[in-house]
Amino acid sequence: MSFEIVADCGHARAGLLRTPHGTVETPAFMPVGTRGSVRGILPSQLADAGAHILLANAYHLFLRPGDEVVRDLGGLHGFTGWKGPWLTDSGGFQVFSLGELVKVVEEGVRFKSPIDGASHFLTPEDSIRIQENLGADVIMAFDECVRQPATPEQTRAAVDRTIRWARRCRDAHRREGQMLFGIVQGGTDLKERDRCAAPLLDLDFPGYAIGGLSVGEDRPAMLATLDHTAALLPRGKPRYFMGLGKPDDLLDAIRRGVDMFDCVIGTRNGRHGTVFTSEGALHLRNKRFERDSGPLDPVCGCPACRNFSRAYLSHLFKAEEMLGPILASLHNTWHLVGLVRDARRRIVDGTFR
Amino acid sequence: MSFEIVADCGHARAGLLRTPHGTVETPAFMPVGTRGSVRGILPSQLADAGAHILLANAYHLFLRPGDEVVRDLGGLHGFTGWKGPWLTDSGGFQVFSLGELVKVVEEGVRFKSPIDGASHFLTPEDSIRIQENLGADVIMAFDECVRQPATPEQTRAAVDRTIRWARRCRDAHRREGQMLFGIVQGGTDLKERDRCAAPLLDLDFPGYAIGGLSVGEDRPAMLATLDHTAALLPRGKPRYFMGLGKPDDLLDAIRRGVDMFDCVIGTRNGRHGTVFTSEGALHLRNKRFERDSGPLDPVCGCPACRNFSRAYLSHLFKAEEMLGPILASLHNTWHLVGLVRDARRRIVDGTFR
């Protein structure tokens, strides 16, 4: 396992992340298969879209079908049919999203399963064990994601706990052939980002994520925090901006030296009839597409654009046919993966501004 | 356009139905794309499954997006992305399924749209015009499907109207390169089947359907009616059993000389987690599949069986992931199309009993 920068252009970098299940060209957009399946899209279709690595969520797979079931069926690579690289998020973000159902203590997190109401207690060590069972190529530390807006005291306490838990995660991690990334928290407080990054760098993780950003703060604050945080991270290690996926945001973050991205926006918007195109977003339920014989995006080579018209897609959504969400999700995945791949090409060419 | 019998084995026949958009090897199972889309399955995946012809419904497409929209966007072949042969059902069966919302007079049928409550009046001539706009290779006469159980008087009246409307359909049909099939009604009353078939044969349709069967009557009555009705139809023309799709029923009907079938059972059961296999039906939500690493069906070559385990499919259904219904529908389509294709091969070989 290694990370190599092969070209840069300003702060932007093109790299190669080598994993036991294949090499990921970075910058890379990772389609999200929270429960081990990218919604509505087959692994072969993801490969056709140019995806190199997928993301799954340890928390969701722990609850169902259970990480030991996944382990016994060959880990994520065997269980899901996607044989290429996987990254699992630790589940910190999802647990903290449960709101009233979660209680945090120093040892870990107590929460009720939203599936069956069963009570669970999850520690950083549990999260690592779960992620070892799932067997992804890249796994994430179990962090505390404070809910926004947060007071300075809440942000500080979450940073402190994130640091202590990162050390416990690193100490608990045993599995070979699996990279554990640290996560820098701190909200939009640059001093807290400094305070979080320093001890995590001492722990010498093979990669670092920027967490708790693009969670509702305004855009200038997001970009300022990103500028500041990216500059704190070691040049030679991959940088992953968790949960970022809007086309403009991806390009802004690549420009600031980020290497990896994930977001549900492509499949979620696709399911609801909104597609990204080179000319902006289209809402397929809009009446003006009912007789539009053109493709979703004339410059896109995806199966939806090659074979179907906007009018047909519009009909599928109005008739509530499954093929509508499928095709729109597929198109959006091609669009986002392709956008990041094109940025990489221009970094290599030296034409990425 | 022509129909040629290339082999027979008992009453069973293997044929070639030549249409402007390709040749259909019969017996053929037609996947159902009621609204111009087979639920959850791409046209390219249907071709991979071995489907030669799809079915759509004139009534549904008339209501949405409108048959003129489909016509202006290239007919079904241009609009939907399936460039091979299409068959449209006239919509008679669907209109009569509306129950309280429908009123039949000699001129036609008045009904309220279940989409928006708008009132529509549809005549046999309208149905033909709609089907001409949709542009399928095979279209169906507009018939009266009496609701079961029916009194002898109701059955008799529906047969009389079906005959009169069949003549009006034939007289209204103008479009070249499009076959109009007649539909034999009469419930399980063999005398009514005789009485319906004779005048329809005089009208010399290029093919005949058996309607109003497999709609709730018991199996011996269904088979006796099929035996009787198939024997009434001209040997040299294609015979289509409307709405039949259970595996055992398909084989029984092929054995009795039926050439064409359609049924939603593959995709509908698939969406609900039931798959057909060489060893019978499996209900994927059943607990026993949670750790089953085998394919849905060891003898199936479909993308679901080649790439995924029963355990993964079970997980997809429990997690309500779209890929579950997609893969199960795809598998069932392969199974039904393949079952009928294998029967054809054995008819040609002379090994079909």
Image (spheres, coloured by chain):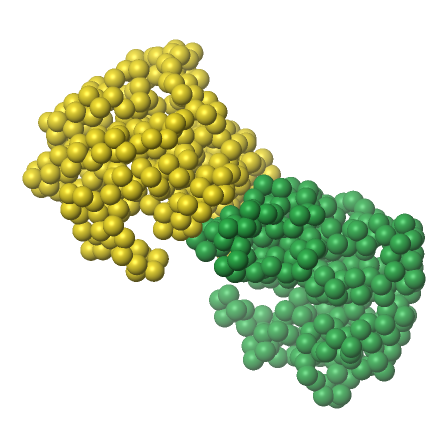
Chain colours: A yellow, B green
Residue located 82% across and 59% down the image: B259
Provide residue B280's location: percent of width, then percent of height: 67, 60
- The answer to whether residue A125 is left or right of residue A66 is left
Provide residue B13's location: percent of width, then percent of height: 88, 57
The N terminus of chain A lies in quadrant: top left
Provide residue A53's location: percent of width, then percent of height: 44, 31
- Reply above or below: B289 against B243: above
Residue A281 visible here? no
Furthest residue toward left: A153
Residue located 60% across and 39% down the image: A307
The C terminus of chain A lies in quadrant: top left
Residue located 80% across and 65% down the image: B253
- The answer to whether residue B55 is left or right of residue A68 is right
Residue A29 in which image quadrant: top left
Residue located 64% across and 54% down the image: B332
Provide residue A240's location: percent of width, then percent of height: 31, 28
Residue B307 in which image quadrant: top right
Residue B300 visible here? yes
Q: How many numbered marks, from 0 up?
A: 0
- The answer to whether residue A262 is left or right of residue B146 is left
- Reply above or below: B285 against A224: below
- Which of the two residues, B73 or A44, is positioned nearer the viewer here? A44
